[in-house]
Image: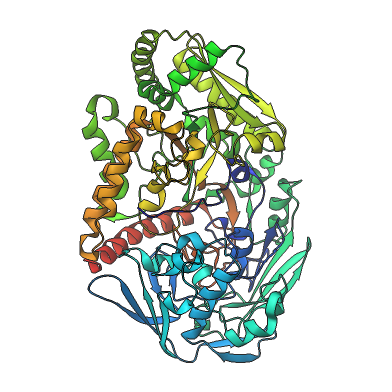
Amino acid sequence: MNNKMKKVVVPALLLSSTVLLAACGSGDKKSSSGESSSTYNYVYSTDINSLDYTFSARNTNSDHFTNFVDGLFENDQYGNLKPALAKSWEVSEDGLTYTYHLRKGVKWVDSEGNDYDEVRAQDFVTALKHAVEVKSEMLYVVQDSIKGLDDYIKGNTKDFASVGVKAVDDYTLQYTLSKPETFWNSKLTYGIMYPINEEFLKSKGKDFGQPSADSILYNGAYILANNTAKSVIEYRKNDSYWDKKHVYIDNVKFTYYDGSNPDSLFKEFDQGNYSMARVFPNSGGYKDVEAKYGDNVFYSQPMGTTYNVTFNLDRQSYNATSKKTEQEKADTKKAILNKNFRLAMEFALNKADYLAQNVGKSGSEKGIRNILTPSEFVMVGDKTYGEVVQEKLRALDPETFGDVKLADGQEGWYNVDKAKSLFAKAKSELEAQGVKFPIHLDLPQAETSEMLVNQAKSLKHSVESALGSDNVVIDIILLNDDAYNAATYQATTAAAQDFDISTASGWGPDYQDPSTYLDIYDSRTGAQLQNLGLEPSEIAKNNSSAEVVKEIGLTEYDALLDKADAITANDQIEKRYEAYADAEAWLAANALQIPVQAFGATPRVSKEVPFTRQFSWVGLANQKYKNLKLQGDAVTIKQYDKALKDWEAKKVETAKENTSNQK
């Protein structure tokens, strides 16, 4: 099992905020006159603080630099990998050596657009070495993948030549892996795997990648033209770009927005100043949207990040609590460790009402996620991954899971009768242990966010209504931002997690394989175990988590992960996905966390031509403006729905083709 470093996870607070990037959705675009524009206009809310694309993991940086520099691969609008700087490649029979043949004549240009050099294989070697030297925030994606890289990072070897990357010649690049990875190429879409010209890097020294246009070279579709803090970020088209025939927008402009007036986004769109706008059905200004654009408000597609309700399985901290006695603490812990209790909570949660507090009632089901890994993340033959998991889940317990549906965009779990039935079993089991009711569950929430507080109230209402407040009470603990983050998102140890249940947990994928989600709860190395109040056993030996891990049967889950991880041949990829579906079914059946919502699925008006933007569950494709087209008038719901239907069909078709080609 790969040892993953803990990755930065965006808390649910940011999902609901008005930190809005232009790439948040798919849509259409035109000027107020009805003529299509050659400039994309929208807003940004966080200044660029680094253009070192091999270093930064922040999307507030990568949303921009992925438009300035190309890597070996990119994605098409259906999510399929396609060659970018690599025109072709081969994989050795043992799956360990990947050889890439680069396009000739691809130019590096400076910030003025002047030719600097040609992109060569050595640039990729230089980039990876630089990433290690600057202690890249993205090293965890490839540290265990590339042969010798982990040892070099840890100082066990001193010669970078021992690392499995080399320039065979100017146009031939080779990576040697530590073990076969069927998903390796999907990792090449991250900035850490982009090239750097060595001569330019040396000339810049520590100034390389600073947030100024002249700190990097460009081989991508755009050049940074203006970056003025808390004012404006502008791109202009790179006239020397190797694939400029697929760049349809000449200029991109983001104006700083502090989030204080969400309705202003729509007003600027209506005046022709913005190319799209997020709209807010629960705001006072939404009546103006409905009056003028009632046929134009559509919901963006759900993306790869999954947000959860998590249970603290071994709570140690009680700084933020309503509990008054040690008995209450002990009873709550026993309840949370009871599988039927956790499942009752899952079936009791009205996710649509929960999401409606953010996106309004009419589209509240669109953002629902019912399993950790998105249902359509990979295909298993003619079936989506979620369909396979659903079959396996139902087979585990037809009575409990026979009606559960796992695809996105529907209430796949909410069932009050089933919640009551499962709770009755849990109550009987817990009373036999001496547990007293009601069970009090502390749910901390940021008092500064009205929307998040309303979501907490929704969760409280649905659970207490279904199970009875004489049985379960959700105690909402309102905290200032610092205290809330310290108790949840920014807690650095399992013991510091100060809650019984929390909504401040989410995970986005790093590569195109179910393990990128499922490994996070591996009891030995899991990057999200701390959010469950547990410490990974390989990090903290002989810790109190061991007893809890045994009680909830998490070692069974580990064994399922190991079985799937051992299937590494490209021609066995469907068997690998089937094996991971077994692990996913176990996770769903045990309800250690409750998947609630996907990033995205938010209402908007737009003038982007639907689904012309690149798409991917992983990497940086969704933030690229290459391929994106604009139209003159706002997209209609009818236009979007037709395009969505065509896109979904083509996405499934091409995914099947790609899976077949890997056999």
The answer to whether residue 475 is above or below residue 327 is below
The answer to whether residue 143 is above or below residue 329 is below
Q: Residue at x 42, y 55 (%)?
A: 644
Q: Residue at x 67, y 66 (%)?
A: 50
Q: Nearest the camera: 194 or 646?
A: 194
The answer to whether residue 26 is above or below residue 368 is below
Q: Residue at x 60, y 16 (%)?
A: 323
Image quarter (top left, top right, bottom left or bottom right) of the C terminus: bottom left
Image colouring: rainbow
One can see residue 381 in this view: no
Which quadrant of the structure image shows residue 343? top left
Give coordinates of residue 549: x percent, y percent: 38, 32
Give coordinates of residue 78: x percent, y percent: 40, 63
Give coordinates of residue 632: x percent, y percent: 60, 66
Q: How many marks?
A: 0
Q: Nearest the camera: 223 or 428?
A: 428
One can see residue 23 in this view: yes
Q: In the figure, is residue 128 to the left or right of 256?
A: left
Q: Nearest the camera: 481 or 127?
A: 127
Give coordinates of residue 298: x percent, y percent: 53, 49
